[in-house]
Structures are given as C-alpha cells and as structure tokens.
Amino acid sequence: MAVDLSKRVYKDAGGKAGTAHIKELFSGEKVRARIAEMGKEISADFQDLERPVVIGVMKGAIFFLSDLMRNIDTKDPLQLEFVRLASYGSATESSGVIQTPYLDLPNIAHRNIIVVEDIVDSGRTAKFFLEYLRGQFDPKTLKLAALLDKPSRRAVECKADYVGFTIDDLFVVGYGLDYAEQFRELPFLGELVNFS
Ligand code: IMP
Ligand code: MG
C-alpha cells in the first residue's frame, strides 16, 4: 500500500507527537520538469561565461540544487560551493537577523556566480548573501535562482533572476523546505495546512 504523505508525524521541541496535514501543491514530477526548464534557461545565459560557480544555500536548497545542477550544461566546467545561512525565529517567521553557520568559500573573485536558494520570502537572506558576495568577490555575473518566490511577503527589495514557482503567502514544506527542521524529505512541495 502506498504511504500517505499528506499526514506526517510531527514532534515538537518537547518531543510531543502530533499530526501535520500537508496538501500537495506541486508534485515531484512537476517540480523536476520546472527545474529542467530553469536549467535550460541558465545554460543559455551562462553558456559562454567562464567557469561558472554554483553556490547552494543550505539546507533548504539541497534537492533543488542537485536537480538544477544536473540540468545545467555550459561550455566551461561548473564549480559547486555551499554556504549555510539561517535566520532563526519562530518556525514560520524569520527573525530578520541572518546567521552564517558556514560561510567558507574559496577565492571566487570576479567569477560568474549563480546563487541557489530554496525560497525568497521576506528577501532578507538572499539580499544579505548577494551583498556579501558583491563585497567579497566583486563577481563578473551574479544571478539568483530560487525554487519558490513569495513576492507578497517581501520586506526588502530582492528579485530572483530565475524562479521555479511564484506562490501566495502559504507555508510550504518538502523538497528541502522544513518546518522546525522537519518534512524536508517529502518528495513534493506541499502546503503545511495545520496540525492535529
Ligand atoms: P527570507 O525571509 O526571504 O530571508 O527567507 C528565509 C528562509 O526562511 C528561507 O531560506 C527558508 O529557509 C525559510 N522560509 C521562508 N518561507 C518558507 C516556507 O514557506 N517554508 C519553509 N521555509 C520557508
Ligand atoms: Mg528553514
């Protein structure tokens, strides 16, 4: 029997279990098809650029990043780097203060960079990181790819160059996105509807 992924066990910080109700928004198939299109777009834009660097923002971008990178085809070799950024707050609301638990990049001065993010929500994380890269490395090209965009939530100006899906103000989990570090492994994008 197929596992019902719309009801998932959730454990709160105290270890108390409940049920999270998750409504599928985009199936895994749909997500992968869209990522393949994004890969084509990025390939066209970066085709003739020297040694592009893909920087994945962990942890949320992990599955998007791995799908996207395998759909990018450029003349010059691609380099992969990671950072880990977080803006701790409540489980659904970012604090606005960006933490940098891992920000160890090699010298990528004047390179052609594609930043890969799970979602642009308030825009603070992406804005912070793009400004950081500009200041540290003066990139020749700097583009932002986000699997999801919630423009209605923007608190600072930030525009992604490549967007998978534009969504309303919903809280989304799966395909790398979490609620309190849970549900990242769901193989689709779903709305976290409620708990019981
Ligand atoms: P920001 O508000 O644009 O800085 O986004 C900060 C981070 O909040 C994102 O990188 C995500 O990790 C997280 N986030 C924002 N919206 C959602 C959501 O709907 N589901 C899961 N994580 C989210
Ligand atoms: Mg998160």
Image (tube, rainbow, N blue to C red):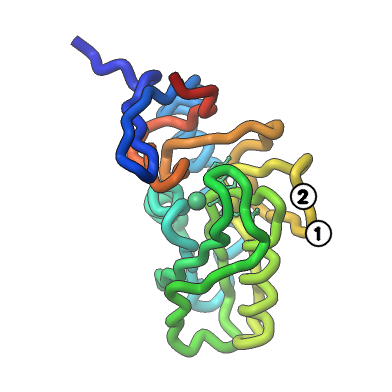
- Residue occupying the point 58% across, 55% down: 89
Q: Is mark 2 within 8 Å of ligand 1?
A: yes
| Callout 2 touching callout 1 (CB < 8 Å) | yes
Image coordinates of residue 151 in percent, x first then y, are: 75, 43
**Residue nearest the observer in this picture, 2 or 27:** 2
Label 2 SS: loop
In the image, residue 20 lies at what x, y percent?
Answer: 42, 25
Say which residue label 1 marks: 157
Identified at 51% across, 28% down, the residue is 192
Q: Quadrant of the C terminus?
A: top left
Q: Residue at x 51, y 85 (%)?
A: 108
Decide if residue 183 is on the left or right side of residue 131.
Answer: left
Q: Does the image show residue 78?
A: no
Q: Residue at x 63, y 62 (%)?
A: 125
Left or right: 154 as drawn, with respect to 57: right
Q: Provide the residue designation for mark 2.
A: 154
